[in-house]
Image: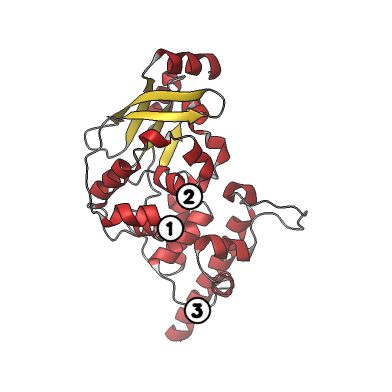
């Protein structure tokens, strides 16, 4: 009797898992992932095959997961599915619970910013400012940063400075090739990685970058550097060459999340910024 009850509970949980995944899948606009849909669809959201492709799993495997079949799921794959479905940390915990696993303590998706951070970001406009965690996820940004880096061009799930630098041509085109700080950025990332070795969210990001020749070369060096302010040069599609001093400001002594503010390093950059960025 107890065995039948236990099996019934497992079936109920798998059924709930399938319904949860289907519901979350239908709420995702394909354009959030940069997918171009040319024909009108009967149903909203992502298709199963699109979720599978974005998460790096087979369509058959993901279909089985949605159907509630009794299959083995790894922590890393669940995180990938959660990333594609844009799950917040409460929803991610729920996903792990339904699959009978315990969510990792640090998923890379759990940073919740104080409300005062948003106030500070708005007050800094038009100076570009962005909030980063150690993994270089872009957690928030203001209008100045939106203008500088063209943030509307990138799907929200790809808002990671390291990922965009290696994989997105629009992001790459805004960085002055004569003063590219990518080697320093990778060394900063490597230094932060020491406290997160083996964590699935970090492994997922590194896995997405592996196979890119320049990343593989820089990653193999094992260079480490502390994060400091740098002079950054950009090529804006409308304003042309721009130079900024980047200043990292940690939110608190115990926090590893920082606000980086970009201040114009010359008169031309200052004039372009103040004449172009609209605040309010």
Instruction: Point out the tag, 2 or 1, that comes first from the N-terminus.
Output: 2
Element under disc 2 = helix
- Give left or right: position of 134 versus 141: left
Mark 1 and mark 2 in contact (Cβ < 8 Å)? yes
Dot label at residue 167: 2
Element under disc 1 = helix
Q: On screen, 278 above or below 226? A: above
Instruction: Point out the tag, 1 or 3, that comes first from the N-terminus.
Output: 3
Q: Residue at x 44, y 76 (%)?
A: 72
Q: From this viewpoint, which residue is outermost toward the front? A: 178
- Give left or right: position of 230 versus 10: left
Mark 3 sits on what residue?
A: 70
Mark 3 and mark 1 in contact (Cβ < 8 Å)? no
Mark 3 and mark 2 in contact (Cβ < 8 Å)? no
Mark 1 closeness class: few <14, some 14–19, many ≥20 residues within 10 Å: few
Asked if residue 29 can be seen in this view, the reply is: no
- Give left or right: position of 77 versus 133: right
x and y percent of residue 159 in the render?
A: 47, 43
Label 1 or label 3, whichever lies nearer to me, is: 1
Q: On screen, 150 above or below 71? A: above
Mark 3 closeness class: few <14, some 14–19, many ≥20 residues within 10 Å: few
Foreground pick, 15 / 38: 38
Foreground pick, 8 / 217: 217
- Give left or right: position of 179 versus 256: right
> In this figure, what is the number of numbered marks?
3
Q: Residue at x 49, y 75 (%)?
A: 9
Q: CA distance from mark 2 to mark 3?
A: 36 Å
Foreground pick, 179 / 162: 179
Mark 1 sits on what residue?
A: 208
């Amino acid at each position: 009797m107890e065995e039948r009850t236990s099996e019934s509970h497992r079936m109920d949980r798998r059924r709930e898992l399938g319904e949860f995944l289907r519901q979350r899948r239908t709420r995702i606009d394909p354009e959030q992932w940069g997918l171009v849909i040319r024909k009108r669809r009967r149903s909203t959201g992502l298709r199963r095959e699109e979720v599978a492709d974005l998460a790096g799993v087979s369509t058959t495997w993901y279909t089985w997961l949605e159907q509630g079949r009794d299959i083995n799921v790894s922590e890393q794959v669940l995180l990938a599915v959660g990333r594609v479905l844009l799950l917040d940390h409460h929803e991610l915990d729920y996903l792990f619970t339904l699959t009978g696993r315990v969510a990792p303590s640090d998923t890379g998706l759990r940073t919740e910013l104080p409300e005062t951070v948003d106030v500070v970001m708005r007050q800094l406009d038009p100076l570009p400012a962005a909030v980063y965690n150690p993994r270089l996820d872009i957690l928030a940004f203001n209008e100045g940063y939106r203008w500088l880096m063209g943030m509307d061009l990138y799907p929200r799930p790809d808002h990671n400075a390291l990922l965009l630098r290696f994989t997105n041509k629009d992001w790459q085109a805004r960085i002055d090739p004569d003063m590219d700080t990518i080697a320093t950025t990778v060394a900063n990332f490597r230094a932060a990685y020491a406290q997160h070795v083996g964590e699935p969210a970090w492994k997922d990001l590194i896995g997405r970058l592996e196979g890119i020749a320049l990343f593989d070369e820089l990653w193999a060096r094992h260079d480490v550097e502390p994060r400091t302010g740098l002079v950054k040069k950009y090529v804006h599609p409308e304003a042309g060459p721009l130079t900024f001093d980047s200043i990292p400001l940690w939110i608190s002594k115990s926090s590893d999340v920082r606000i980086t503010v970009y201040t114009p390093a010359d008169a031309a950059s200052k004039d372009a910024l103040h004449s172009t960025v609209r605040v309010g």
